Image (spheres, helix red, strand yellow):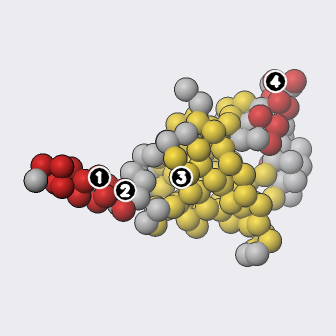
Amino acid sequence: MMPLLMLGALLAAAMAGPSSDSAVGHWRSPTKNAVIEIQRCGASLCGRLVSSDDLRADPARKDVNNKNPALRGRPLKNMLMLSGFRQESDAWVDGEVYNGADGRTYSGRITIVDANHLKLRGCVFVPLCKTETWTRLP
């Protein structure tokens, strides 16, 4: 009887989806080896750029590609790159992804693959999307 109870508890946990903090932490993006720190921002998730190949080459690098000329002088280091993601079942949806390479903001979705991987999808509009797999850092 006990193994059935344990199996039931494990199945219930698996069906519940990710915990609200399963995406919190430091993640490496394959694009320019960026390191993003994802954290809770109120009821949503957000993420800041901690490091990248560009920042290692020039720690004072600015947001020169921003579509808004008034924002082009702000530093990329610690810039908010992910914002507004709200949890919906097994994903975080309705977020925004800022791309410093082109200065544009895209609609985004974060899906947890496993404890050490997530998929971030950014879309101009569906189906014009790009998905990356990020790896958790220790």
Q: Is residue 53 above or below residue 38?
A: above
* C-alpha span from label 4 to label 1: 43 Å
Instruction: Choose mark 4 or mark 3, whichever is in front.
Output: 3
Mark 4 secondary-structure assignment: helix
Answer with left or right where residue 54 lies relative to residue 114. right
Q: Position of residue 110 (x, y in %)?
A: 59, 57
Residue neighbourhood size for the residue with mark 4, other residues' Cα within 10 Å, grouped as few (<14), some (14–19), many (≥20): few
Instruction: Choose mark 4 or mark 1, whichever is in front.
Output: 1
Mark 1 secondary-structure assignment: helix
Q: Amino acid at mark 2?
A: Ala
The reply to whether discs 1 and 2 touch (Cβ–Cβ < 8 Å) is: yes
**Residue 97: quadrant of the picture:** bottom right
Q: Which residue is mark 1?
A: 10
Q: Position of residue 43 (x, y in %)?
A: 42, 56
Q: Is residue 68 above or below residue 114?
A: below
First reached walking from the N terminus: tag 2 or tag 4 = 2
Instruction: Choose mark 2 or mark 3, whichever is in front.
Output: 2
First reached walking from the N terminus: tag 4 or tag 1 = 1
